[in-house]
Image (cartoon, rainbow, N blue to C red):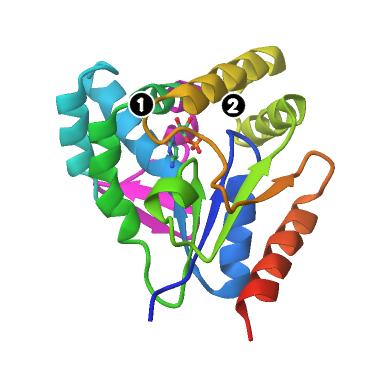
Amino acid sequence: MTVPVIAIDGPTASGKGTVASRVAQALGFHYLDSGALYRLVALAALEAGVEADNVQELVRLARGLAPRFEAGRVWQDGRDLTLAIRREEVGRMASRIAVHAALRAELLRLQRAFRRPPGLVAEGRDMGTVVFPDAKLKVFLTASDEVRAARRYQQLIEQGFTANICDLLADLRARDERDMNRPVAPLKPAEDAYRLDSSALTIDEVVRCVLDRYRGEHTP
Ligand code: C5P
């Protein structure tokens, strides 16, 4: 029997992360934050002084990844990188390196290895279109630019970072632009995706929508 997957894709700061981990928790499923993998490669590249266009080195760094995701924390080589990978600089680098087909191909195997019984909730940009095209449910989660900038601002402040909301707005628009217009695995809804705009919804409401949809369609 194939292991069911719920794919949740959408632009930066659309709330995918929180929604996906809450849905996974409610169903007792595993959870994959695919963006964290791109961010781990980005951080390793920044630390090693590898440029965003050095595909060969980036692929080598990706091959060396053996991250552990535990209780909301991300470990790599015995280091807790949970906060380090959330830095804006790392997110920007992640989006720049994510354009390379060879790097994306290298990360495919790692992402698919998260598919284990009883099920997986995977979030990112291409979960429903490329990584898990046979997902049982595909959700494309959006929110207005302003709402997303405000959410990102709140998140950074809570994590103890300083932030400027106008810079965040400009940055997320630039990142969307790059994610939507790259030739390989661009950010776009899968044809059979359930589209949900969370601008005026609470996290609880979005989680409920996704769970209702999944249970309505996939439980006897
Ligand atoms: O989701 P998050 O903001 O953590 O992702 C960081 C960057 O990694 C994104 O801006 C995107 O360019 C890239 N990414 C991707 N495909 C994914 C997940 C993330 O290209 N499945």
Q: Name the mark on residue 43.
A: none
| Residue shown at 34% from the left, 29% from the top | 42
Q: Name the mark on residue 99.
A: 1
Q: Nearer the viewer, residue 187 or 22?
A: 187
Quadrant location, the N terminus: bottom left
User: Is ligand 1 less than 8 Å from the beta carbon at label 1?
Assistant: yes
**CA distance separating discs 1 and 2:** 27 Å
The quadrant holding residue 48 is top left
| Residue shown at 30% from the left, 22% from the top | 46
Asked whether 76 falls inside the magenta stretch, the response is yes
| Residue shown at 19% from the left, 33% from the top | 59
| Residue shown at 38% from the left, 51% from the top | 131
Q: Are marks 1 and 2 in contact (CB under 8 Å)?
A: no
Residue 138 image point, x, y percent: 57, 56
Sequence-wise, which precedes: disc 1 or disc 2?
A: 1
Mark 2 closeness class: few <14, some 14–19, many ≥20 residues within 10 Å: some
Q: Nearer the viewer, residue 80 or 212?
A: 212
Q: Name the mark on residue 161.
A: 2
Query: Looking at the picture, does residue 212 appear above or below residue 161?
Result: below
Side of 183 relative to 152 (left or right): left
Mark 1 closeness class: few <14, some 14–19, many ≥20 residues within 10 Å: many
